[in-house]
Amino acid sequence: MDTEATTSAPADTPPAVSSRGFYGCAIAMIVAVVLIMLAAAGLSEFEKGLDGDGQMEQPGPDGSSSQPLGAGMTARYEDGLWVTVSAPRRVGSVYRLTVTYENDTDGELHLGRTSLDRPLVVRGGTADGDGGSDYGTSWVNSEQSEDALAPVLPEGESRVVPVLVEPSRRGAPVTVEVTPPHAGYRETSYFELSME
């Protein structure tokens, strides 16, 4: 009697998975994700280039005269300039506040007056101009503030500009307009403060 040993694999055994195929798919997925991220970043920069880097990117109020920023808020420009106006603090009949410029742009900034436009204006009334004649406001140290803006602001540094305001009455609204000079164009940001 011949006995033949038959060795055959069971019919239900799945085929072996190629590790080369698995790693190839994983690498392809990583490359695809990186390409998508680069495309998104490029699209964002392209969009900024279309509307200019002097535009503001604001969550909440946009800093315009119809939606002014409040005390302690920051106007964020697309090119990396940030401007913050502090809450006013009463010292006798005068209110003290500061305007802080933070330069995270790619170069130095000339914040001082470079044309007829003033880079910093403090006036009585609301940002949209309603009731402006009802509120007299004296900007006590305007020359000192302009002198603080005159030197060039280097990249990566900040500058604090002191502002002293004497409103005609307590509780009067005061508007601070910030128009940082720019080679092309930079929007004016409006801050509306209450002198309580």
Image (cartoon, helix red, strand yellow):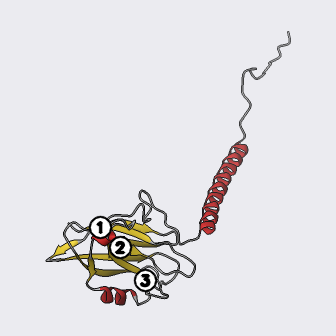
Q: Give 70 or 129, whichever is nearer the viewer.
A: 129
Q: Residues within 10 Å of mark 3 (few under 14, many from 20)?
A: some
Mark 1 touches mark 3? (CB < 8 Å): no
For badge 2, the amino acid type reads: Val
Please provide percent x and percent y for residue 90.
18, 73
Q: Please identify the residue farthest to the top as the structure is shown.
A: 1
Can residue 86 be seen here? no
Please provide percent x and percent y for residue 45.
61, 65
Q: Please identify the residue farthest to the front as the structure is shown.
A: 133
What's the distance in space between the residues labelled 1 and 3, CA to CA?
Answer: 20 Å
In the picture of the structure, the residue carrying the numbered disc 1 is: 193
For badge 1, the amino acid type reads: Leu
Task: Kindly identify which numbered label has been placed on residue 3.
Answer: none
Q: Give 153 or 55, whichever is nearer the viewer.
A: 55
Please provide percent x and percent y for residue 183.
56, 82
In the picture of the structure, the residue carrying the numbered disc 3 is: 118
Residue at 41 percent of width and 60 percent of height: 67
What's the distance in space between the residues labelled 2 and 3, CA to CA?
Answer: 12 Å
Q: Quadrant of residue 184?
A: bottom right
Q: Please identify the residue farthest to the left as the structure is shown.
A: 92
Residue at 30 percent of width and 76 percent of height: 98
For badge 3, the amino acid type reads: Arg
Residue at 42 percent of width and 61 percent of height: 66
Q: Is residue 110 left or right of residue 32?
A: left
Instruction: Give SS at disc 3.
Output: loop
Q: Give 64 or 38, whichever is nearer the viewer.
A: 64
